[in-house]
Amino acid sequence: MTDERAWVTQPDLASRRFGGSVLWANDETFAERENLITPAAPVFHAATFGHKGQVYDGWETRRRRAPGSDEAVLRLGLPGVISGVVVDTAFFTGNYPPECTVWALAVEGYPSTDELRTADWQQIVPRSPLNGDTRNPFDVASDRRFTHLKLEIHPDGGVARLRVHGAPVPDPALLDLSALDLAALENGAAIDSCSNMFYSVPTNLISPGNAQVMGEGWETSRRRDDGNDWVVVRLAAPGTLRLAELDTTHFKGNAPGRATLSVTADGTTWTPVLDRVRLQPDTRHRFPVDAPEATHARLDIYPDGGMARLRLWGAMTETGRSDFVRRFAEVA
């Protein structure tokens, strides 16, 4: 991508991995709309022809012979505040759209595609030029929480991927704030920092669902010193932890040997809540913990290796609940 933006490190709220879906497109003659939100990077195999021509890993519409534009409507897997979008035209060279517009919508429940198409959409990226075979980034200035997105291409062509980077903002009405995973991305938690992300990003640790392969976890490079690797998670809200799950599923020859867990409420004083425990490869480990009120948790692995998921179950404090509800109200 040219002109790399800092927000590309934020989660892709539209990703199929997080439950995103492409609900509708007015045309998908050459390539299916669902490809837009595939987590993997687009690929291309030259001279690979199907019944509709060259096979493209993306969404591609027919050549327009009348005025107008083509559209695709997406439901975000993680509703939230959008920092920026990337319209990736990888491998589309003579058939990419010259321009695009991006719209967003916040709606409750599960509307039909007909209801979405006639809804009051807000423009978050004005009509802008696109380059072919390029990851085209666009900043989004809105601080509203959105649930759906619409990509409009002018007039037609192919887009490989649409990435929607931002911060998840869950609806408190859909959660039990007295018993939830305080480290879950979908509940509003985030990665603050980590020592190493050589093979994969630590956001995978707190992503929804179980890891299907090793690449969907967090894995560090091999250490050649006396140190250890670690990751710090900002909890969804201040709370008290009751149960920790350290999951090494799919990590067989590269799981950490041991791990510790500590928490903090002030960012400086860390309280151990899980002593250095031995870990087994390819295993979901569950440990009861008795933790004080905390805003952040730190997982240390010894000396290095990979973890599929980190789950920290507990309850929000009264202050945490108030902050959580207020944040939703401010962006809804």
Image (spheres, rainbow, N blue to C red):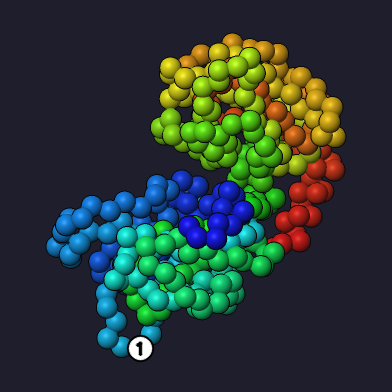
| Residue at (80% x, 22% y) in the render | 271
Which residue type does callout 1 highlight? Answer: Pro
Residue 128, given in percent of the width and then of the height, sits at 50, 76
Residue 182, given in percent of the width and then of the height, sits at 68, 37
Q: Is residue 260 left or right of residue 62?
A: right
Residue 59, given in percent of the width and then of the height, sits at 34, 63
Q: Is residue 171 left or right of residue 207?
A: right
Residue 208, compared with residue 163, is above or below; it is above
| Residue at (23% x, 52% y) in the render | 45
Residue 44, given in percent of the width and then of the height, sits at 28, 53
Confirm whether residue 144 shows in the render.
yes
Q: Quadrant of the C terminus?
A: bottom right
Q: Is residue 123 left or right of residue 179?
A: left
| Residue at (36% x, 56% y) in the render | 35
Confirm whether residue 152 shows in the render.
no
Q: Toward which corner of the image does residue 178 lie, by quadrant? A: top right
Q: Which residue is mark 1?
A: 67
Q: Is residue 324 left or right of residue 311?
A: right
The residue nearer to you, when weighing 238 against 119, is 238
| Residue at (64% x, 18% y) in the render | 227
Residue 255, compared with residue 202, is above or below; it is above
Count the marks: how many?
1
The residue nearer to you, when weighing 44 against 162, is 44
* Label 1 CA crowd tier, 10 Å (few <14, some 14–19, many 20+): few
Element carrying mark 1: loop
Residue 28, compared with residue 321, is above or below; it is below
